[in-house]
Image (cartoon, rainbow, N blue to C red):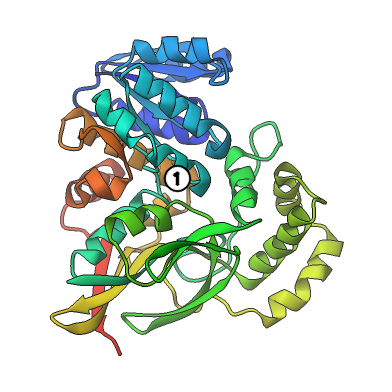
Amino acid sequence: MKVLALGGPGAMGTVAVQTAVNIPGVTEIVVADRDLAAAEGLARRLVDAPMAVRAIQVDVTDDVQLRAALASADVVLNTVGPYYRFGLAVLQAAIDTRTHYLDICDDWEPTLQMLELDAAARARDVCAIIGMGASPGISNLLAAIAAAELDSVRDAYTAWPVDVDGAGDATRDDAQLLGPDGRPSAASVHWMQQSSGTIKGVTAGRLSEQRPLRPVTLELPGGRRGTAYSIGHPEPITLQRTLKPSGDAINLMVMSTWAMAYLDTLRRDIDRGKLTNEAAAAAFADPNLLRILRSAPTALRAKGPGTLPPFFAAVSGTKQGRPHMVLAHLNLTGPPEDPAHTLLADMARVTGIPLAIGMAQVIDGSARRPGVHPPEAVIDPGRFFEVLDVVLGRQAGSVPVYLVEQESIG
């Protein structure tokens, strides 16, 4: 199949393309970006790939140019963000040109809009998988694995780390906040968008409006306990459709109290119209003393992550008639050099690799079901994590890339 990689030269797109060159069934990769020189640079770096890799210029805001590029491809990997600006238009163009589609959309607003294109995609025999990254993506598949252990689902929580590592220690990676030009990255702008205003969660089985950065304290199997903070993300929206929880569902950030408090200060300034998302993202990358002082009372009152895993899905419900909770989480019990640690520490890899692995199931036909789907609806979790192990180069017989723990509750 011929693959169009929109936004290929970006950090996450580059990883996706580098992974895709090793996927059976890929016959050509076209790297597309509004910056032709950047696209050509990535194509040159892959000159030894087992298939042709070439570059073209595509600005996704130019509908004619976008549709011409899509029309000559079998499947598109869309890594152009933020998705609340560009996601819906690219998906609509892919459906119109009968191009299978995958993205890493992590905004809840366009997720709702894109799911409404399901009938149109089915009518055109197009398979579209939205949110095939880390969170959403890996998180959805962990939730599906956890839910499969239950007879019924009550609550579903997914969580990802902001500034804590597998040992619960604080970390910081400004490379994820700023682009090569020193301006806020699309990911950091998205983060400000989803940390402000109102967000969608699930309450009593139904979608509900909530405020972001709400503390949620969890007690998980294995004696793990701590507090994480809500953020706007697609997982509650899609899990409400696929797992059908009768209780609550929300996406959470596992983060230090000081990072949460500073983000909350920026949230208030965004909500009051004092900061744009771009300005807030820049302010998070370069904190100033005044906002740090404003954040101090919140930080001192807040509860921290405790012993929560940094990346997990926790699903509660019933099993054999009794209340039960299942925790599925990335396995960070190995040595620091274990690929699972390095994967979680690199936003580009933990997002771009799943996108390419998900595409592999579209190319081989196992996930190629017409319609617009979240990952957990069509991707086989077992096969996904088996391929992830191979891509990471983990040794046969080593500890699994994820763990499942469960216990009766109540």
The answer to which quarter of the image holds residue 141 is: bottom left
Q: Does the image show residue 4?
A: no
Q: Is 357 on the left or on the right of 386, as rendered?
A: right
The reply, left or right, for residue 188 in relation to residue 322 is right
- At horizontal 71% and vertical 36% (from top left) the residue drawn is 182
Q: Amino acid at mark 1?
A: Leu
Which residue is at the far right? 290
Residue 210 percent location from the top left of the image: 56, 64
Q: Residue at x 36, y 42 (%)?
A: 132
Q: Position of residue 74 (x, y in %)?
A: 28, 18
Q: Is residue 184 left or right of residue 156?
A: right
Q: In the image shown, does 189 or 318 lie closer to the viewer?
A: 318
From this viewpoint, is residue 38 visible? yes
| Quarter that holds the C terminus | bottom left
Q: Which residue is mark 1?
A: 112
**What residue lies at 20% left-to-right and 33% top-to-bottom?**
368
**Relative horizontal placement of residue 152, taking residue 209 as reference (left or right):** left
Q: Position of residue 169 (x, y in %)?
A: 54, 69
Q: Is residue 281 above or below residue 368?
A: below
The spot of residue 168 in percent (x, y) is: 50, 71
| Label 1 residue SS | helix
Furthest toward the bottom, the residue is 410
